Amino acid sequence: MRAAEPGAGHSPLARFTVLDLSRVRAGPTCVKQLSDWGAAVIKVEGPAEDDMTGERHGSDFQNLHRNKRSIVLDLKHPDGVAVLKRLAAGADVVVENFRPDVKHRLGIAYEDLRAVNPRLVYASISGFGQDGPYATRPGFDLIAQAMGGMMSITGLPGHGPLRAGIPLADLASGLFAAIGILVALLDREVTGEGQWVQASLLASQVALLDFQGAAWLTEGKVYRQTGNDHPYTTPMGVYPASDGDILIGASGQGQYRKLCDAIDAPELRDDPAYATADARLAHRAAFNAALSAVTRQRPVAEWVARLNAAGVACGPINAIDQVFADPQVQATRIAKRVAHPRLGEIGLLGSPLVLSRSEARIDAAAPEKGEHTDSLLREAGYADAAIQRLRAEGAVA
């Protein structure tokens, strides 16, 4: 069945309204998954604070906060909390990533907002979770990478712990929270009630340990750093070419024989020390040196062409500019353009998902702070005189 052309579908989440109280990266990553598919997002900002994702007109902020409207509320002011509760009464989702105790002090915890809207799905993202011995600790991505095991298995053997090049814990917790929100919304269709969705950077990072985590839980095995080599199979890693490096993945015996034939290296195929997967793993250092002596004789592009023709998985090691110049990446249409009133047309990262009848959209650049305060208050039923009073008292801005 032929997929629908982009733009041919509807926005599946357009019927949902999201109050975004989050900041930095994990929470906005979560909300971005919803706004790109049409959810109406209201970014709730404090009067004296700025989001910690760089300058408002910088690329990071613009990428994280597209497709939103902005209202400024002082949640330390009782009237500011009253406004939030009125907005929550007509919303479907709230997302926050305060420290667990903060929302209770402000009177905007799940129980507080559920009292005005039992159908509300309330999502909390924190460093360590809503309970447990570390619940009130400050936490951010690198702490979760360290405590969640990622840094112990990343990097070259003997070179000490190494962070991942992207904020994995932030991104994972945001994505897991978005999944939880969607699950809760589906459940609400059956039960009529919302629920509290909780995600943490630490638990999300641990979940990403995947087979390394399962190996400890089921076998008592602790994986360590293996650099660019796969932890338990080879060849599956980076090898030198004459003009750069190439990633080769040929771990199965069939793939390995194809690799040896494609690079004209029958000696690697026939050598008993390298003939089986177990043998290659047992002699990995010598095997990698022997394979590298062959791969460094030709340029990356030639190896990529040869190996792909032979059905062997491989690819170049692209820098960021090369990523977006790659024709396959361009075919995904993940790079999007959107008009900004001050910056002109800017480029942002779109959704990687493709649906046959619906399309993720970036319809608007990130809002100016408080750009929509008055219009949102009017939509919530406040008269202009009441808005002026709230502004004069400092409850809104």
Image (tube, rainbow, N blue to C red):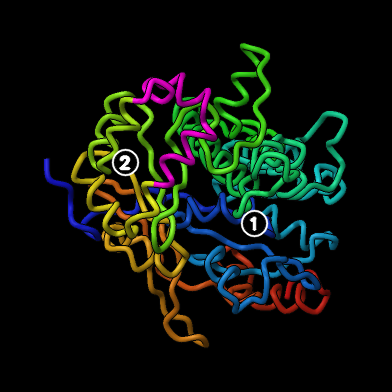
Secondary element at tag 2 = strand
Task: Give the main secondary structure, helix, strand or loop, of the magenta stretch.
Answer: helix
Residue 96 spot, x, y in % from top left: 69, 50
- Residue 230 disc label: none
Residue shown at 60%/76% (left/top)? 58
Position of the C terminus, as image quadrant, is bottom right
Q: Helix or strand or loop: what does disc 1 sit on? A: loop
The quadrant in which residue 273 appears is: top left
Residue at (12% x, 45% y) in the render: 2
Nearer the observer, 276 or 181: 276
Residue 25 circle label = 1
382 in relation to 36, above or below: below
- On screen, residue 142 versus residue 324, left or right, reads right
Read off the residue under disc 2.
Answer: 313
Left or right for 141, reference 287: right
Q: Dot 2, crowdedness within 10 Å: few (<14), some or many (≥20)?
A: some
Question: Mark 1 or mark 2: which is in front?
Answer: 2
Left or right of residue 11, residue 91 in this image = right
Q: Residue at x 60, y 36 (%)?
A: 226
Q: Earlier in the sequence, mark 1 or mark 2?
A: 1
Q: Is residue 289 magenta?
A: yes
**Residue 88 in sight from this viewpoint:** no
Q: Horizontal and vertical percent for residue 15?
A: 42, 50
What residue is drawn where x is 64% and y is 77%? Answer: 384
Instruction: Residue 83 in the image: state x and y as whole percent.
Output: 71, 60
Stretch of the chain drawn in magenta: 271-293
Around disc 1, counting alpha carbons within 10 Å, would you say few (fewer than 14), some (14 to 19), or many (20 or more)?
Answer: many
